[in-house]
Amino acid sequence: MAGAFWEKVYEPLIRRSAGLGRAADTADPDHYEKTNAFCDVLVIGGGAAGLSAALAAGRAGARVILCDEDFRLGGRLLAERDEIDGQPALDWLKAAEAELMSLPDCRILRRTTVFGVYDGGTYAAIERVNDHVPVPPEHAPRQRLWRIVAKQSVVCAGAIERPLLFGDNDRPGVMLAGAVRSYVNRYGAAPGRHAVVFADNDAAFRTATDLADAGIAVNALIDARRDPSPAAQAAAESARAPYFSGAAVTSVRGALGIKSVLITDMNGQNQQFDCDVLAMSGGWSPTLNLTTHLGGKPAWDNGLSALVPGDLPPGMSVAGAAAGKFSLDACLASGEGAGAEAARNCGYSPSAPARPVAKEEAATPASPLWQVEKSRGKAFVDFQNDVTVSDVKLATREGFRVPEHVKRYTTLGMATDQGKTSNLNGAAVIAGLTGRYIGAVGTTTFRPPYTPVAIAALVGHHRGPDFRPTRLTPSHAFAKERNAVFVEAGAWLRALYFPQAGEAPQDTVNREVATVRSKVGVCDVSTLGKIDVQGTDAGTFLDRVYANTFSTLAVGKARYGMMLREDGFAMDDGTTARLAEDHYFMTTTTANAVKVMQHLEFCQQVLWPELDVQTVSATEQWAQYAVAGPKAREVIAALLDSGQDISNEAFPYMAAGSFTVCGGTKARLYRLSFSGELAYEIGVPARFGDALIRAIIEAGAPHGIVPYGTEALGVMRIEKGHAAGPEVSGQTTAHDLGLGKMVSKKKDFIGRFMGERPALTEIERASMVGLRPVDKDTRIRAGAHLVPKDADATASNDQAMSPPWPTRRSSEAGSRWRCSPAGRSATAK
Amino acid sequence: MEEFTYRGDATVTRPESLDASATDAWVDYVYLRDNPAGPHKEHWHHSAGCHAWLVVTRDTRTHEILAVEFAREGS
Amino acid sequence: MTAAVREAYGVDLPAKSVTARGKSVNFIGYGPGQWLVVSETLAHEALAEDLATRLKGLASVSDQSGGRAVLRVSGPRARDVLAKGLAVDLDPRAFPAGGAVTSTISHMGVQLWQEGEADSYDIAIFRSVSASFWRWLTASAAEYGYEVVTTS
Ligand SMILES: [Zn+2]
């Protein structure tokens, strides 16, 4: 019962405490869609670099698409108190956005993340059109998937700040310094009342100034770097807080929220500072994921202590922080340069830039801390998957020394953020533990998607009945009125049978078959592939693609044909009529219509381009109905306009010709039988298909006509011994199908040579046989076992090619059937 | 990509002889394919477009398309 | 053949994927040596018969009028609607006036050409998928609002 206890108590408890949700049990009520876009220059990211790039390209006249995942453009400009050209950066941002929106060919996609890079300059992006509202407006999608084809792209995806690794770094109130500045500067929200800043880079100490200016007390600035940094010291001064270089936070107090931190200074002395927010920063990692989706490897930049983009896909450039250019001025300059270069590569002439300038502050180089060695408590590396420094240590002790292996052992970087904040810290810990240089440890591979994407967005419109296009036959409306049960045949929806009130399916099929055998029935066969073959060499061409001969077929006649693959196996079959000296009309099976068309085009364009022959699909052009049964001629005759003769003499078996029906409508008539009895196929342009089926039913009413479906068609063709799709399985030859006599010995054709290989012609090969139950009141079901007459139903008597069953089982499963061979020779060995 | 249908090696030639001595040539044509790392001529069908068979020269290592010509004209 | 077409229909047969409107017919190139011919005056088989007679010995003609439906999508958001299913750049910079293309819209084969107003596109679709196509088209246009206008 331990299992039940686990399922009922522990697992729900664990799932709840781990924050795992419940799977939805109803369909997503929202609407998603996909769309395509094309541009010269795709700018990925709308921060300072991205805006500069888009402006440079757009001003040059290029078609630009600018994507940003935020609902507002600006990136870090929104969260910092920078100046551009001596003015607040937000003023520049406003002007830049207004200018971009005024450009005729610049599309700005907000709330849109470019998440994948594919061959041929193709990019995938997800636009969260209405994620921010509880219910999207009517007819508006919740999300929209963009497939963007761009001649050039400029990746300005920015950078992601790294946490510092010290004990209890996951306590509420410990947050990234950049996040603290976003709260204060962008949203005007106080993340706490008194703060401590702990970082290893100058940029992060701006947090102290910003907090102090906002009226939030700063109690200490802890700099991991040994040498004091003037910039950090200045920040400490402005915040009127003590500054410690060469120091680190070694423990955190407060379980539900941070209350104070203990720091160890460079002399090893401990001090405690009260705070309810700890702003930390371990530096920034360029967001270079998109540069690696096609196989590019990032490179380690020792000066920056960061991975930077390596080999780039064709047409891609990187600017701003994503390229390791962390200062605002460098972002503006590199964005401008990359945007102009991208436009130039598309054939535009950007004018010499008068680019905006931001004051470059002298900075003390960052010196990454990576890890606080002497701290107590769990130091989290991956905050989403709860992987700690000690987990990584265990992994290396177990012998996992490369990030790809450590990842799989610890799940480091395997959460939905895919290691955006943890990968480099993890690599640094591994490097430290294994005594290697961090650049030599390497990183894991980034693959699309950059950010989680809802499956519904990838699916778009194609759900439920729109999962894929449905092809409806010309008689679909008629069949629906007659309560037809439909079956999917490829993309087609075909009538399977036409049940009458209170009729069981088998009874329906039996009635349909019996009516065709005794009176007359009509079946829609428009789904057969139809190919118009014209040209002076049409006969020669057909001789080469069919195993039998068509050049000798008389005009006005049809012939059954078998097509082989070049390896000698059967490919498809159908009837082809000769309508004129240089005009044939081919039919294929429903399933192979597209494949045969493609095959013919290959033969025509690649193998024998010298032949004068043209092919075009006419499947959609003709509504075609089989009218079969002893009364078929009367029904067809009633449809024909007067003065046209279809007596057996005038229109014998396998005749084909043009007639008019129903008062002048042109029709093609073929005297073919798929199921054995007197039968015709009549074709009219598809727009008359609905009218024709109704006219056939009316004309056939006095003879008791019924519409019949594919199930009855299948029953009758099996009774007739006609091989069809299920038998043309790619493993059968014309000989296997009992059609060996058709195969010409007088000419070359596709499959001729290979079809004559001994293994394909030997007498021992399995061949098609017909079976009839001895007891005619019973039915041979698919999968039934065959045993010789009067023999026991045991495995050893089973005639199927199958490994022997244990005797005990076979007596249970043994067949009730006693089958006698019919049709071609079927001897029980 | 649903626009094109890939067939494969465009460098093989259908033998003309039906003589038993042509067996090796036929087996080569139907079954044996080189698998070069680098530029490779392949047959592609523009199945969702103009229905032309194309000879596409593709670098099998990078998927870079180096040249495209109509198969009918190339032969 | 070019001469015969010029003589019969007063138009130069386009060598590329573009439309060329002649007397009562519109020749739309859709592949090497292949044209879709559309007419608003020669109905159904009459067009095929006319072509077959006038181009006898020069071209093979196959009537497709029963197998296609032609509809026109027009308006300032027409390109936005079509982009939801068509991976072809219809921007005037890439798709000039009178341009034509054979492709797929939402996995359904189409022939599309542009004539007249810049934001107006004619699309020939296969009869059997017309219901599926209509569902896609109305779903894609709903966001912008649309009006259905029928012609005889
Ligand atoms: Zn093409």
Image (cartoon, coloured by chain):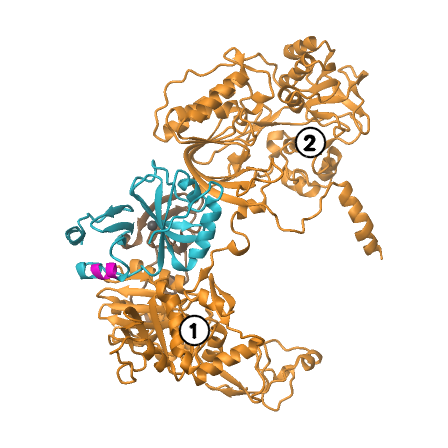
Chain colours: A orange, B brown, C cyan
Q: Position of residue A732 (x, y in %)?
A: 45, 73
* Mark 2–mark 1 distance (CA, rounded to whole Å): 73 Å
Closer-to-camera residue (A474/A100): A474
Residue A298 is a magenta residue: no
Closer-to-camera residue (A266/B65): B65
Residue A41, visible in the rendered structure: yes
Closer-to-camera residue (B60/A511): A511
Q: Please name the residue that numbered disc 1 is placed on.
A: A523
Q: Position of residue A488 (x, y in %)?
A: 50, 64
Looking at the rendering, the stretch of residues picked out in magenta corresponds to C46-50
In terms of secondary structure, where does tag 2 sit? helix
Q: Chain of mark 1?
A: A
Residue A83 found in image quarter? top right
Please tell me whether mark 2 or mark 1 is closer to you in this view.
1
The reply to whether label 2 and label 1 mark residues of one chain is: yes
Q: Main secondary structure of the magenta part?
A: helix
Q: 10 Å neighbourhood of mark 2: few (<14), some, or many (≥20)? A: many
Question: Is A715 placed left or right of A81 in the picture?
Answer: left
Q: Position of residue A657 (x, y in %)?
A: 27, 74
Residue C47 is a magenta residue: yes
Residue A327 found in image quarter? top right
Q: Residue at x 29, y 74 (%)?
A: A549
In terms of secondary structure, where does tag 1 sit? strand
- Name which residue type carries label 1: Cys
Looking at this rendering, what residue extends furthest in the right direction?
A1
Q: Please name the residue that numbered disc 2 is placed on.
A: A429
